[in-house]
Amino acid sequence: DIQMTQSPSTLSASVGDRVTITCRASQSISTWLAWYQQKPGKAPKLLIYKASTLESGVPSRFGGSGSGTEFSLTINSLQPDDFATYYCQQYNSYWTFGQGTKVEIK
Amino acid sequence: QVQLQESGPGLVKPSQTLSLTCTVSGGSISSADYYWSWIRQHPGKGLEWIGYIYHRGNTYYNPSLKSRLTISGDTSKNQFSLKLSSVTAADTAVYYCAVKEGVVAGVHWGQGILVTVSS
């Protein structure tokens, strides 16, 4: 099984900050990685797929990078609507999710 | 865009079978390269992939659930279903149906349904 490890588990930030969340795979997954945003009581929303491709309609302040085993999600100029939990997902072999990173207001 | 809606009992007794259906609109479950999926989220926890069905009824299951799991599709109703047998309290979760529109794409989700396993 491919394990996905996100860091940090919680991130405290202010509106306007640039934040970065990291996701590490236990083995190479090429660029078969997606990022999701989830708000309380809601389903996850796709932000990025294939490591760096922005889903249609997602603001350009969201960006993804990485390949192999190391990936990151960056949010430039954090907005009030961005406080949520973020998950990475590998789809190279079956599917596995990271444990989540909660972005909270500092 | 494809829309997904889960339906089924919100309460299941231990040892029974959990059965959920996902109704698809705006797309066909017969579409090649679409992966029709189930994912769950235990209360306050992260996401667990359950399995998916794709082209011509092929299925892939999470190995940890495989012995209890069946995912099937009904093309006449444009629905796909989940059956999880011998449930315990550990199967209490929000169950999402979801679709991955191609090998490269990410996953789009239904709204989810809470299923509680309790006597």
Image (cartoon, helix red, strand yellow):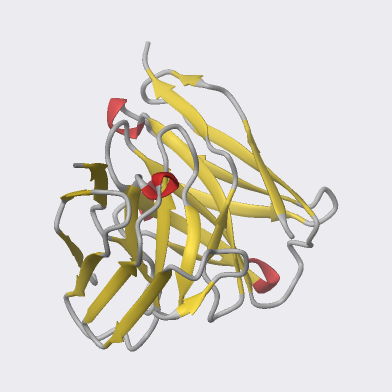
Residue projecting furthest to the front? A16
Front residue of B59 and B93: B93
Horizontal side, residue A28 vs residue B60: left or right? left
Which residue is depicted at the point 29% across and 54% down? B64
Name the one closer to the observer, B81 or A13.
A13
Task: Identify the residue at horizontal 23%, vertical 53% (top origin).
Answer: A99
> Number of marks in the image?
0
Position of A100 relative to A29 (above/below): above
Give me the residue at 79% from left, 62% from top: B28
Q: In which quarter of the view is residue B1 placed?
A: bottom right
Say which quarter of the image contains residue A36: bottom left
Q: Nearer the viewer, residue A57 or B119?
A: A57
Q: From the viewer's perspective, is residue A62 above or below residue B77?
A: below
> Is there any visible trace of residue A45 in the rendered image?
yes
Does residue B65 show up?
A: no
Residue at image point 44% right, 45% down: A81
Q: Position of residue A41 (x, y in %)?
A: 45, 32
Residue A96, how many percent across, how many down? 32, 63
User: Which residue occupies the extreme top position in the image?
Assistant: B119
Q: Position of residue A93 (x, y in %)?
A: 36, 76
Q: Return the residue nearer the eye: B104 or A39.
A: A39
Tell me if A3 is positioned left or right of B43 in this view: left
Q: Which quadrant holds the C terminus of chain B?
A: top left
Q: Position of residue A21 (x, y in %)?
A: 23, 64
